[in-house]
Image (cartoon, rainbow, N blue to C red):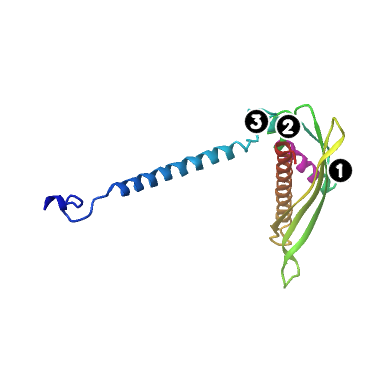
Amino acid sequence: MWWHDKGTDRSGVSAPRGAERREAAGSAHGRIMRAAAALAIAALAGGCFQPLYGEQSPTGGPVLRDQLSAVDVLQIGAPKGTDEARIAVEVRNALLYDLTGGGYAAPPTHRLKIAMASTRASIIVDVNTSRPDVENYGLNVTYTLTEIATGKIVVTGTTFARVSYDIPGQEQRYARVRGLRDAELRAARVVADNIRMRLSSYFIAGT
């Protein structure tokens, strides 16, 4: 009889009933709500981040760029005329660029003092000639950030960099010196980046 067949279509497959329709609608609604919640969480998390050279702070406070550019980086002590003195200049110049973005420094509110020491070690040696084929150049750095207004040390830290470079042969002295210089520049860059990130963390989070 036709009234017994109204729950099935012509192919014999049962049509969705009211409860099934409500369950499908509820599932779709749940997916939409979960997606909206995920987007809201992402938006809140995004508000915790502050672009280094942004024009305005999400919280309305001082811009991180301005705070970093107000850090006075003191000259790094090293014996004059030595490799250490040259590397100290490289580290300071790289850090100054990181803090100011290549622009002018702001009136100083904090003072950064850095001490550093370099190391060199052979990590691969030719067994036939006993000469190094690969050396490792390292920089070990300690630093303190002092608030000028109060004279209080607000940040202390240490960082380091280890960079390897090839030695193409004792007869290629220029290539060996060039490899060492490149390693020094890379190490200075790594150290400066590490210090900048630590100071950024302090100015944003206060720790």
Query: Is tag 2's residue or tag 1's residue first in the polypeptide sequence?
Result: 2
| Viewer-closest of 87 and 108 | 108
Rendered location of residue 17, percent (x, y): 27, 49
Residue denoted by label 2 = 67
Query: Which residue is pictured at 71% across the width and 47% down the height?
Result: 190
Query: Which residue is pictured at 18% across the width and 51% down the height?
Result: 9
Looking at the rendered structure, the secondary structure element under dot 3 is loop
Left or right of residue 13: residue 187: right
Rendered location of residue 191, percent (x, y): 74, 47
Q: Quadrant of residue 50?
A: top right
Which disc number belongs to residue 77? 1
Real-space Cα distance between discs 3 and 2? Answer: 14 Å
Q: Is residue 132 above or below residue 62?
A: below
Is residue 2 on the magenta stretch?
Answer: no
Looking at the rendered structure, the secondary structure element under dot 1 is loop
Residue denoted by label 3 = 59
The 10 Å Cα crowd at callout 2, few under 14, some 14 to 19, many 20 or more, is many
Left or right of residue 27: residue 76: right
Of badges 3 and 2, nearer the viewer stands: 3
What secondary structure predominates along the stretch shown in magenta? helix
Of badges 2 and 1, nearer the viewer stands: 2
Q: Amino acid at mark 3?
A: Thr
Q: Is residue 41 above or below residue 164?
A: above
Query: Is tag 3's residue or tag 2's residue first in the polypeptide sequence?
Result: 3
Which residue ends up furthest to the bottom in the rendered image?
A: 128
Q: Amino acid at mark 1?
A: Gly
- Quadrant containing the C terminus in the rendered view: top right
Q: Is residue 122 above or below residue 17?
A: below
Q: Which residues are magenta?
A: 87-97
